[in-house]
Structures are given as C-alpha cells and as structure tokens.
Amino acid sequence: RGVRRAAQEWDPFAGLKLTYIDPTTGGSAMPTISTFLQLLPKGFETKTYRTTENTIFSPVEGGGRLIVGEGDKSRTFAFKPRDVLAVPCWVPHRIVADEETVLFSFSDRIAQEKLGLWREMRGNA
C-alpha cells in the first residue's frame, strides 16, 4: 500500500496529520482532549518540534524512533504498533519512520487552546 503524495503536501514537522473532530459541531471530538492520526512515509524524519501540549503517541502501523530532547541530553525510543510513548510539555522531539508509519495521538491541546495557553515552536529556535 505505498503512499504516493507530492512532496509539498508533507508537513516537515508532522507528515500528514489529521485532527479528529465532532461532525455535529466542527470542534474537537472531546471537550478537553485533542485526538490525531498521523501518517509518515518510510524514511521520513520530522523536524524538531515543541509545544505546550502533553502528548501520548500510540503507533497503529509501522515502526520507527521517537527522539526526545536535544544534543547529549536526547533519548531515542524505538516503537512498534501498540507501544505507548509520552512527550511532556515543551520538550523538543522528532520522529523517524523506519517503515511507513501510522500514529494515533492525543493531547491536552484543545483545553490549552480554550484557556489561551497553547503555543508551539517549529524547529530549533
């Protein structure tokens, strides 16, 4: 089932990332939890990303590595389907897809957005 998409469609920080929504309201599927499904093609490596949200990842298909932190303080966690990985608030991280990978994730993003607290940093700044 190879993925064929034009390179410009892939977000360098997330690949293809969909947000689950409540179709009756157009808002978040849950009032305080944001939920996502993310696709990363084989060999894709996201750029470093950090956010105020606390995120839990659970791989659905494929496998790869989650690199948390930067420099000599970074830690690498290999993952496969049904693993659970957590990235705390404002910790820089990136994902390397060793295979075509589908990740389910959820976070407290919608709650932070409602409170005016959410922010992100894309790249090393």
Image (cartoon, rainbow, N blue to C red):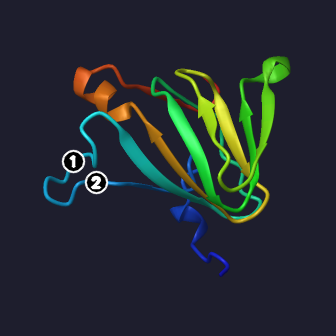
Question: From this viewpoint, which residue is outermost toward the right?
Answer: 72
Circles 1 and 2 in contact, beta carbons < 8 Å? yes
Mark 2, Cα crowd under 10 Å, few <14 / some 14-19 / many 20+, is: some
Is residue 110 or residue 119 the one in the foreground? 110
Q: Position of residue 65 (x, y in %)?
A: 76, 45
Q: Position of residue 67 (x, y in %)?
A: 74, 35
Residue position for label 2: 21
Q: Position of residue 22 (x, y in %)?
A: 23, 54
- Secondary structure beneath dot 2 equals loop
Location of residue 77 (image quadrant): top right
Location of residue 39 (image quadrant): bottom right
Q: Position of residue 103 (x, y in %)?
A: 58, 54
Question: From this viewpoint, which residue is outermost toward the bottom?
Answer: 1
Q: Does residue 73 appear to the left or right of 120 in the view shown?
A: right
Is residue 40 or residue 7 the one in the foreground? 40
Mark 1, Cα crowd under 10 Å, few <14 / some 14-19 / many 20+, is: some
Q: Does residue 98 appear to the left or right of 6 in the view shown?
A: right
Relative to 98, residue 88 above or below: above
Relative to 27, residue 10 above or below: below
Residue at horizontal 28 percent and vertical 49 percent from the top:
29
Residue type, mark 2 in image:
Ile
Relative to 47, residue 19 above or below: below
Residue at horizontal 52 percent and vertical 34 percent from the top:
55
